[in-house]
Image (cartoon, grey):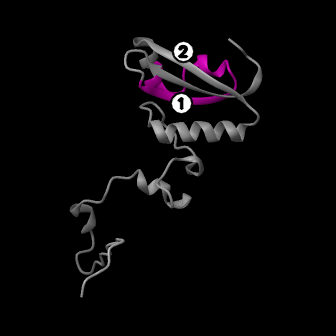
Amino acid sequence: MEVDNGHYVYIYRNQNNDKVRYVGRGKNATRAVQHQNKSHNKNLEDWLQKNKYKLEISGPYGDNETAIAVESALISALNPDFNMRKESTQYSFRPLGVPNKYVSRLQKEPLGLNELFKNNTQRILLVKVTDKKLRR
């Protein structure tokens, strides 16, 4: 394995169905294999011990910021099971035109009636946003 200094992004993929289970990054390529012995992520560690997987590495990237961008974009696009931390929304895939500050809202479950009327049954203003013209 190449161990040049640089910044790398890696994915652990289920060998049976090619589903990406984890995306990570590190300052050198050896960071990717450290999860196989001991990981900060217990669920990933357990899965690696019990399953067959493929490890794929990209890089080196010129700087950490580029590696963060690649890792964040992959996590947002692939939604791997074992990624725990939330990556920077700056690099997340999102519908065109959605400002960066609202990206995290897209990942939340829609409000149900129970949440909507919770603690406030007196006055509620509902606004429907649409591109259709209202009829008179």
The image quadrant where one finds the C terminus is bottom left
Q: Residue at x 50, y 27 (%)?
A: 41
Residue 51 to residue 8: above or below: above
Q: Which amino acid type is shown beneath numbered disc 2?
A: Gln
Q: Mark 1: few, some, or many residues within 10 Å (few <14, many ≥20)?
A: many
Q: Which residues are magenta?
A: 19-45
User: Does the magenta portion include 1?
Assistant: no
User: Does the magenta portion include 23?
Assistant: yes
In the picture, measured across the screen, residue 7 lies left or right of residue 82, that is right
Q: Residue at x 63, y 42 (%)?
A: 69
Residue 40, horizontal then vertical, whole percent? 54, 26
In the picture, measured across the screen, residue 123 lies left or right of residue 33, that is left
The image quadrant where one finds the N terminus is top right
Q: Which tag, 1 or 2, sits closer to the chain's start?
A: 1
Residue 117, horizontal then vertical, whole percent? 24, 69
Q: Which residue is mark 2?
A: 36
Residue 98, horizontal then vertical, whole percent? 50, 60
Q: Which amino acid type is shown beneath numbered disc 1?
A: Val
> Under tag 1, what secondary structure?
strand
Give me the disc on residue 23.
1
Residue 135, horizontal then vertical, whole percent? 25, 83
